[in-house]
Amino acid sequence: MAINPNDPKVEIARRTRRSFMVLGGGAVAGLAGWAALNRRGAEGDIPPALRSILGFNERVVRGALYSNDHLVRTYPESAIGNIKVNADYGLDDDIEDADWRLAVTPYGSSQPSARLTMADLRALPRVEEIIDFKCVEGWSTVTKFTGARLSDFTAKFAPGSEKAECVGMKTPNEEYYVGLDMPSALHPQTLLAYEMNGKPLEPGHGAPLRLAIPVKYGIKNIKRIGSIEYTDTRPADYWAEQGYDWYAGL
Amino acid sequence: MNTLEEKHKLATRWFHWINFPILSLMIFSGLLIYWSYDPYNIGIGSLTAIHMFPDWFYNVTHIDHKLAYGMALHFFIAWIFALNGIAYVVYTVVSGEWRELAPEAKSFGEALQVMKHDLGLKVPMPPQGRYNAAQRITYSAIIVMGGLSLLSGLAIYKPAQLHWLTALMGGYEWARWEHFWLTMGYVGFFAIHIAQVIRAGWANFRSMVCGYDVVEVEGSHGD
């Protein structure tokens, strides 16, 4: 029997062949894309392709979404939970709280212009906020922080430094460090906190001074701040070096 | 007399076969994220039947300690998942294809009949168009779930900048709960979907790839 090209059986065989070839080609292209996406970069970091996508997401969020008028939700005292000490990176130095000083390097300087005491910090307007502290791991705990706005701090101790792109903070032993974009640093709910849940900060929570920045994940809320620097280049960030998003904004 | 009958539009097939690996990667990267804080259980009250997930699951899958990679992957693939899903919904509405898909008033009663038939009871299949009543309900539900996954995901991703959305989802913790159980819903759907596809046989599967099936035309006088 001659093959009739209009025979539906022939036609569907032709269509099936063609479609499965397209599907197979798509699968091969997809696997090639997957391999390119996962091409490894620096030790301990995520693949460079994913890193650049995090950068793209940051530009989208900062361009289209972020505003310092967007305040995080605040809670009543009754909602406060019992926040755990999740990590102690950079906290194992031997400096007594009385000897603690905060080194401030303003925008454009290479050396600290001031070494502040807690009395200097307490002289700034005292702000209290009860916010939901969000860990990058996924848990969150409603927590009260009391301290000075980083924006007030900057205006008083590093005037003009608001023009910088970034703020970098380190523990006194420089073992833990974070980098922040300036808008998030100047957010009205970003505090240099000296009290937590109505009591002076405990050592595990970053005594005598820590950052409370509810527009970021917990990894940016550095404990026991030893130095603050205003700069245009992105400061090193402990967890960004371990593969996390440098921006880490909420 | 046989003839070719179009079963699935070209666009629908593209959306479907793009979505399959993309949703799989969303679930995979989602598990990498979920591992670092895994509070959910199946149980009644304080009685836990199954912890999500048991240790053996983590041991077998090796999804532990990959949070940073999981987040970066999730926030990339999410773009493709969202764009493909939105394009599909727009196509389905604009083309009028939604009429073949959306449940009708009678679908809910008929779906029970379809289920009985599929479970081997001697119940005839109700007459249907492209999709039977159970498919209309399930496939439509999956699309709604996809939208909810996108919204609850954004609510977790930017709870400060999208605080209104997070509030709409019932708050941060509820959004994460919804996001998780929607995902478990996809896993359940996938299991049943694969079983049904295997049962329906090769011609049905082929039609989802090439779009056509060979059908008998009754009362045709040939050429």
Image: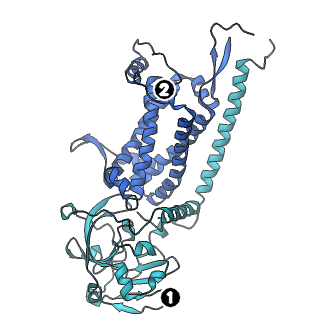
Label 1 amino acid?
Gly
Q: Quadrant of the N terminus of chain A?
A: top right
User: In the rendered image of this protein, does residue B107 appear above or below residue A126?
Assistant: above
Mark 2 residue element = helix
Q: Which chain is blue?
A: B
B38 with respect to B27 (left or right): left
A165 with respect to A103 (left or right): right
Mark 1 residue element = loop
Residue B159 % position (x, y): 37, 59
Q: Residue at x 68, y 38 (%)?
A: A22
Residue A37 % position (x, y): 59, 56
The picture's colour for chain A is cyan
Q: Residue at x 50, y 44 (%)?
A: B23
Label 1 Cα neighbours within 10 Å, binned few <14 / some 14-19 / many ≥20 = some
Q: Quadrant of the C terminus of chain A?
A: bottom left
Residue A108 numbered mark, or none: 1
